[in-house]
Image: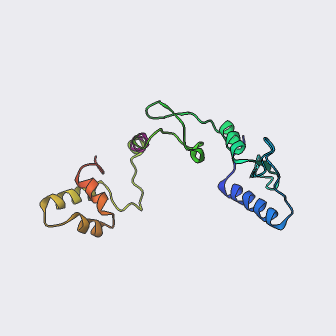
């Protein structure tokens, strides 16, 4: 199956919407079940005005065939059903597994981007200053340009550990 960019998909959808508004393209009934209300489905985004008219149920079933409804979590190995709009890119079954995947990737590639406001040294500095007393988490957050919850995570040892 050929991959298309988001820009190509958006352009194709806009072309169909313009053609329907102009009257050059008429929405028909569902090609699968005959339901009156149908949506346009693009089998090939390089041909923007070539659409299949499918009702929401048939459209969903078609996408379920194209993008499997069951995947295996890359962290814990359990089988899960990803959200319909995230079927292609879903890799984990839960937020905790997603967090573990991100941590795993950070361990594999521990580079901190140059635009990051914090690094390990600054996090250590924040811990020392907060433990010494005389400054609040909100004041530290304002000084370092981050949210006070991020400071809380650092101080409580949940973030920026070596």
- Residue 87: x, y in percent? 59, 42
**Residue 35 located left or right of residue 70:** right
Residue situated in front as seen by the camera: 117 or 82? 82
Residue at the right extreme? 24
x and y percentages locating residue 68 in the rendered image:
62, 35
Quadrant of res 7: bottom right
Relative height, residue 140 to residue 121 (above, below): below
Q: Name the residue rendered at 83%, 52% in the picture.
A: 28
Residue drawn at (39%, 47%), measured in percent from left and top? 110
User: What secondary structure do most residues of the magenta stretch adopt?
Assistant: helix
Q: How is the image coloured?
A: rainbow
Image-based side of 33 in relation to 83, left or right: right
Q: Residue at x 59, y 48 (%)?
A: 85
- Quarter containing the N terminus: top right
**Labels in figure, total:** 0
Pick whichever, 107 or 70, lies toward us: 70
Whether residue 98 is in magenta: the answer is yes
Instruction: Based on the picture, tell me whether residue 27 belongs to the magenta stretch.
Output: no
Decide if residue 52 is on the left or right side of residue 83.
right
Give the vertical position of 85 relative to 12 (above or below).
Answer: above
Q: Position of residue 157 (x, y in %)?
A: 24, 49
Magenta-highlighted residues = 97-104
Determine the residue positioned at 33% across, 67% down.
145
Image x and y of residue 120, in percent:
29, 54
- Quick one: 76 or 129, which is closer to the camera? 76
């Amino acid at each position: 199956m050929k991959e298309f960019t988001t820009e190509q998909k958006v352009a194709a959808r806009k072309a169909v919407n313009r053609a329907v508004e102009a009257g050059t393209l008429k929405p028909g009934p569902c090609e699968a079940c005959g339901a009156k209300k149908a949506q346009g489905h693009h089998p090939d985004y390089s041909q923007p005005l070539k659409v299949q008219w499918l009702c929401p149920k048939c459209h969903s079933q078609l996408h379920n065939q194209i993008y499997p409804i069951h995947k295996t979590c890359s962290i814990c190995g359990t089988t899960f059903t990803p959200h319909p709009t995230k079927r292609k890119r879903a890799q984990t079954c839960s937020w905790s597994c997603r967090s573990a995947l991100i941590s795993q990737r950070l361990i594999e590639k521990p580079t901190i981007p140059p635009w990051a406001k914090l690094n390990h040294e600054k996090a250590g500095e924040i811990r020392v200053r907060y433990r010494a007393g005389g400054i609040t988490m909100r004041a530290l957050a304002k000084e370092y340009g981050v949210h006070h919850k991020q400071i809380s995570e650092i101080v409580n040892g949940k973030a920026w550990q070596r």
